[in-house]
Image: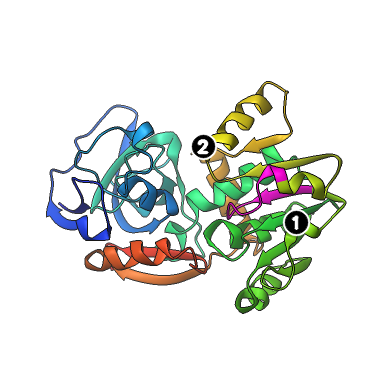
Amino acid sequence: MKAVVYETYGSADVLRIEEIPDPAPRKGWARVEVHATALNPKDVLVRKGKMRWLVGGERQRTPGYDIAGVLLDDADGLTAGTEVFGMIQSNHGGGCAEVVSLPFAQLGAKPNTLSMVEAASLPLAGMTALQALRDELLLQEGQTVLLNGASGGVGTLAVQICRALGGKGIAVCSSRNLSLVQELGAFETIDYTQTSPAERRNLDAVFDIFGSLPWEKARHCLVKGGRYCTAIPKPKAILRGSLRRLGLHRAALVVVKSRRSDLDVLRNLVENEQLRPIVEKVLTMEESAEGHRHIETKRARGKVVIQIKE
């Protein structure tokens, strides 16, 4: 099968297309014919060697953690031929290939109303937003949450999920994206080029998606007992996240978990017209390097998706 691969850490130029073996059948796992995969900042960090402390040394890797496609094997209630989507719970990726294998629990039935490209854009970013807002920030109806970085892949979904949970999302983005986040359901907007989000006060929660509003700044924005969560695994955030799990700190780090139950939540939100993916670019496998470079600008509007099969 064809796959995008790289063997050394470096720029997007290390990416190439190569024939690699199809994954073999494996107990408890299912093979999926991949129609589309989405790119995420994690793909860039791993490829550049920024996460070698976690993923290990140089070896052949295939980018891509989000996939949408057709099941080739029965998978715990899902039959072969079902259209599915999911997130590969691995630090090594593998989604940018014609066939991928992953555990049953990491797959869910694709929303009927979405194309393969749209569905591929949802799992990692959608579950990150859902697990941060629902599980880490414990967002309740009527509470205000600052969404710092509201126009990217996670942010555009967080705005909508916040609204679906009954929260009041204050979306932080640049002026060119204000109309987008308003359309998605932001309760209020902040243009960070004009006003610093760190000036806000009396917030119930802060979700730092972009990484420019660390705990040191965000703590002053919160009401007494207010909660904070970041999606950026910097060393201090990892330490505080560990302390949070012990009940010793208010700052959480969302570490996304791939699970069918949350894929089902995302599917239901989509089919109830409470959530829609924002896809900025659709590229071919041959254009993967272009997609990586766009993600590196940190100015992506929604998601970048690689279409594997028409």
Above-or-below relation of 260 to 201? above
Classify residue 179 as left or right of residue 117.
right
207 falls in the magenta region: yes
Classify residue 146 as left or right of residue 8.
right
Above-or-below relation of 67 to 243? below
The color scheme shown is rainbow
What residue range appears in magenta?
205-216
Residue 94 percent coordinates (x, y) = 29, 45
Number of dots carrying numbers: 2
Identified at 28% across, 53% down, the residue is 96
- Residue 63 or 213: which is nearer the viewer? 213
Q: Quadrant of residue 59?
A: top left
Given the image, on which type of amino acid does mark 2 rest? Lys
Residue 45 visible in rendering = yes
Above-or-below relation of 196 to 68? below
Residue 230 percent coordinates (x, y) = 62, 44
20 falls in the magenta region: no
Residue 91 percent coordinates (x, y) = 37, 38
For mark 1, give the secondary structure.
helix
Quarter the C terminus occupies: bottom left
- Residue 162 or 113: which is nearer the viewer? 162
Q: Which residue is mark 1?
A: 198
Given the image, on which type of amino acid does mark 1 rest? Ala
Identified at 37% across, 32% down, the residue is 53
For mark 2, give the secondary structure.
loop
The numbered disc on residue 126 is none
Identified at 60% across, 59% down, the residue is 155
Q: Which residue is mark 2?
A: 257
2 or 1: tag closer to the N-terminus: 1
User: Which residue is most to the top?
Assistant: 246
Residue 309 visible in rendering = no
Dot 1 alpha-carbon crowd within 10 angstroms: few under 14, some 14 to 19, many 20 or more: some
